[in-house]
Amino acid sequence: MSAENENGKPKKRSLFRELIEDVAVPTFAESIASTLSPTQTEIDAHQELIHRVFKYCPFCGGEDVQNYPSSGIITCRDCGADWQTKTSMLGRISIKLKKPAHNGTGTELLGVDEEPAFWQTMAIRRHAEEQMKDMRQFSASGNSALGPVTPPAPVEQVKYCSRCGARNAIAATYCRSCGNRITG
């Protein structure tokens, strides 16, 4: 595919020219954008981290936490708290509380950027507290999965009559059925 010169003969092209004409060279803006845009693997790793951090809500301990990756918003549907995730160019993730819980929990943390580990620790602790509270309420109400818990009845010790075979209390001297004297 070489062009012709003014004599009608094909133009000679250098090997270097042939090689670079067939290669699509990105513009400066394209190369910067491709460097800064995360790969699908990086996006998946980010989402996995957010899911682990917000398995439970740091304020109410609830499990109904929704992540909206396109906007970077995380919302607890139980208490209404909202967070904003941000990833630096170096890949550092920070999470900022945008809206506290409906009951005001977290107001003191509004607008503060924290590492994911901060929120994860808070969420695990709060969830454990809620689980313990539920267990205390459950046991205080006397409920059990198997019904009320009753201690086992003491094993009754008995002895049998040698004449009629009737069952008698261990302390009995005579058979309650036939009156025979019970020995040992």
Image: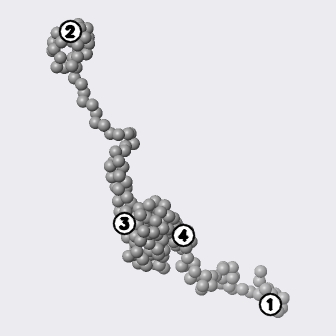
Label 4 element class:
loop
Q: State whether residue 133 is above or below residue 141.
A: below
Q: Are marks 3 and 1 in contact (CB under 8 Å)?
A: no
**What whole-number distance in Å separates the C-alpha atoms at marks 1 and 2?**
137 Å
* Amino acid type of the residue that numbered disc 3 sits on in the rendered structure: Thr
Exactly how many numbered labels are in the figure? 4
- Left or right of 164 in this view: 114: right
Which label was assigned to residue 179?
2
Q: Which residue is mark 3?
A: 121
Identify which amino acid the numbered label 2 is placed on.
Gly
Q: Earlier in the sequence, mark 2 or mark 4?
A: 4
Give the mark, 3 or 2, whose residue is nearer the N terminus: 3
Measured from the top left, where is residue 168 in percent x and y? 23, 16
First reached walking from the N terminus: tag 3 or tag 1 = 1
Q: Is residue 126 visible?
A: yes
Give the residue displayed 77% in from the left and 83% down from the top. Answer: 2
Q: Earlier in the sequence, mark 3 or mark 4?
A: 4
- Disc 2/disc 4 C-alpha distance (Å): 87 Å
Q: Is residue 171 or residue 116 the one in the foreground?
A: 171
The amino acid sitting under disc 1 is Asn
Secondary structure at badge 2 equals loop
